[in-house]
Image (cartoon, rainbow, N blue to C red):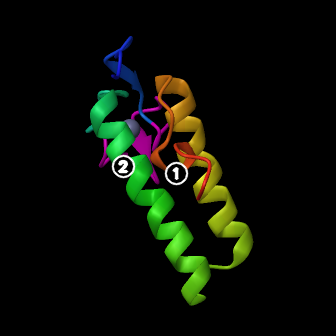
Amino acid sequence: MTIVRITRIVCPICRGERVRLGATCFFCHGVAKVPVDCALDAAERRYRLAKGGVTSGDYPADVSRRLMDEANQIFDIAGVTPPWKQGAAA
Ligand SMILES: [Zn+2]
């Protein structure tokens, strides 16, 4: 059972600055906060991409590592255990 304590967190892409690379943040659309579900979804995709990327050689290990760290941080902020940390067998 999952207990959701907060519903919105600071945008993980622009970190609440509302702009990204000089343009309105594509992720939060300049709102600075995003729904947790949305952020977790993005974090999970980012983690999978990074993990797949390092396996296939699409990403250097350090880039991959940074993306995975960011994904972990987003789950941390939300107080949710990432799917890749559930179940010790993995
Ligand atoms: Zn944003």
Q: Which residues are magenta?
A: 12-27
Q: Find out whether the residues at labels 1 and 2 contact each other: C-beta distance under 8 Å.
A: no
Ligand 1 appears in which quadrant?
A: top left
Q: Secondary structure at mark 2?
A: helix
Would residue 30 be visible to someone looking at this image?
no
Which residue in the structure is indicated by mark 2?
42
Judged from this view, the residue extending furthest toward the right is 62
Residue 80: % across, % down:
47, 29
Check disc 1 and report its element: helix, strand or loop: helix
Q: Which residue is mark 1?
A: 84
Residue beneath the point at 30% across and 49% down: 26
Residue occupying image coordinates x 61% and y 78%? 54
Q: Is residue 22 magenta?
A: yes
Q: How many marks?
A: 2
Give neighbour class at mark 2: few <14, some 14-19, many 20+ (Cα, 10 Å): some
Confirm if mark 1 falls within 8 A of ligand 1: no
Gap between marks 1 and 2, in whole Å? 14 Å
Vertical side of 5 occupied by 66: above or below: below
- Residue 63, percent from left and from top: 66, 68
Looking at the rendered image, the disc whose residue lies closer to the viewer, 1 or 2, is: 1
In the displayed structure, 89 sits above or below 49; it is above
Q: Residue furthest bottom?
A: 57
- Reading the chain from its start, which is encountered first: label 1 or label 2? 2
Q: Nearer the viewer, residue 64 or 3?
A: 3
Image: 89 above or below 24: below
Q: Amino acid at mark 2?
A: Ala
